Image (cartoon, rainbow, N blue to C red):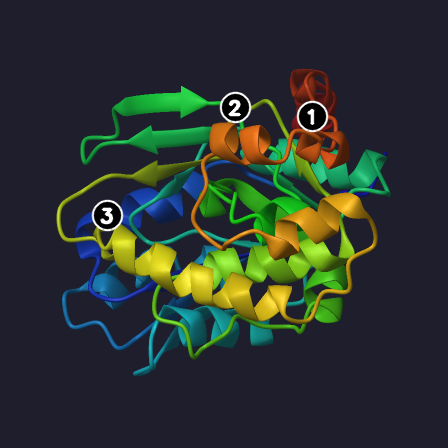
Amino acid sequence: MTQMPRISVVIPNLNCADFLERTIRSVVDQNYPDLELILSDGGSTDGSIEIAERYRNFFSAVLSEPDDGQAQAINRGFAVSTGKVMGWINSDDVLLPGSLALVGSIFTFNSSVEWLTGRVTCIDEADQVLSIRRPRPVTHTRFLAADYQWIQQESTFWRRSLWDVAGGGLNESLRLAVDGELWLRFSRHATMLPVHDQIGAFRIRNGQRSEDIEAYHAEMLEVIDAERATVVPQDDLDCRILNAPLKLRTRKEAEATFPDLCRRDPKPFARPQLWKHRLMRQLHRI
C-alpha cells in the first residue's frame, strides 16, 4: 500500500469560538491517516481552548499564548510541526470533505508538484456555499505584473522543502498580506498547480480582517514593488512588465497589457477526482 505523506495543518485562532469547532471537525472528520493537527491560539478568552480540549486526542499540539498577530501564530504552529506537506486553515474557515485525501494523493503520485491550490469556494456563516470558481493561474511573472487575485489560502498546500527554501516562515512585519507575500516567495522557486476541485472554503462573515481589502492591496503592492527591484529581466516580457507602472490588475487587464503573459501559466490538474477516489479506496482499507 502506498504511504501517504504526513500533512501538518495549523489552525491559528483568537477568540473565534463561534466557528472553531466547525473548523476542527472539518479537518478531523476526514480521517486522514497521517494528520498532524496543531492549534496556535493567541490567548483566547471566549472558550476556544475549552472547545479544543474536547478534541485534544486529535491534536499533536495545542499552543495558547499571546502573540503579535496571525503570522506569528502560524509560524509558532509550524515551528513544532513535522509533516512533509503543510497548510493552515483559519479558525472560521473549513476544509471540505475528502480534501486531505486529494492533497495527499497529488503529492504522493506527482513528485514534481511543490504546491497546489483548489477551487475558490466561499461559504456564509451558516455553512451555505455562496460561490465556487476555478483557481486562477498565478506565476512569479503575474505577481510582478500585480495580477495576483486570488490564490485561496484555505485551499493551498505545499511541501516542507518549498517552505524551507522560501525562508521557512511568514513575514511577521506584515499586517494583512501575509499569505500573498508567502505565495510570491514560493513563486520564485516553484510553479503552483491549479487543481479543479474543492479543497477549502473561506467564510464570509461580519467583522473579519479581510474586510479591509484596500489596505491588503496597498500592502501587497509594496511587497511587489520591493520584489521588482530585485529582478533581473530575462526577456522582453520581463522588461515590459518591470517598465510598466505598478498597479493592481485583474487577469483581464494584465493579459490585455501583456498579451503573452499566459504563455508561462501552468496547465491545470483538471481530473482530480480520479486521484481522490484512488486514495479514498486505500483509506477505507486501513
Circle 3 sits in a helix, a strand or a loop, which is it? helix
Please tell me which of labels 3 and 2 falls first in the chain.
3
Can you say whether 260 is above or below 82 in the image?
above
Pointer 3 and pointer 1: residues touching (CB < 8 Å)?
no
Please tell me which of labels 2 and 1 falls first in the chain.
2
Pointer 2 and pointer 1: residues touching (CB < 8 Å)?
yes
- Local packing at callout 2 (Cα closer than 10 Å; few below 14, some 14-19, many 20+) is some
Q: CA distance from mark 2 to mark 1?
A: 10 Å
Can you say whether 51 is above or below 75 in the image?
above
Image quadrant in which the N terminus is located: top right
**Which residue corresponds to mark 2?**
134
Viewer-side residue, 50 vs 210: 210
Please tell me which of labels 3 and 1 falls first in the chain.
3
Give percent across and percent down for residue 201.
39, 36
Residue 268: assigned label: 1
Give percent across and percent down for residue 188.
72, 58
> In the rendered structure, which amino acid carries the disc numbered 2?
Arg
Give percent across and percent down for residue 42.
30, 75
> In the rendered structure, which amino acid carries the disc numbered 1?
Pro
Q: CA distance from mark 3 to mark 2?
A: 26 Å
- Local packing at callout 3 (Cα closer than 10 Å; few below 14, some 14-19, many 20+) is some
Which quadrant would residue 130 be assigned to in this image? Answer: top left
> In the rendered structure, which amino acid carries the disc numbered 3?
Phe
* Residue in the picture at 65% in, 41% down: 116
**Which residue corresponds to mark 3?**
19
Can you say whether 32 is above or below 274 in the image?
below
* Residue in the picture at 48% in, 55% down: 58
Viewer-side residue, 170 vs 44: 170
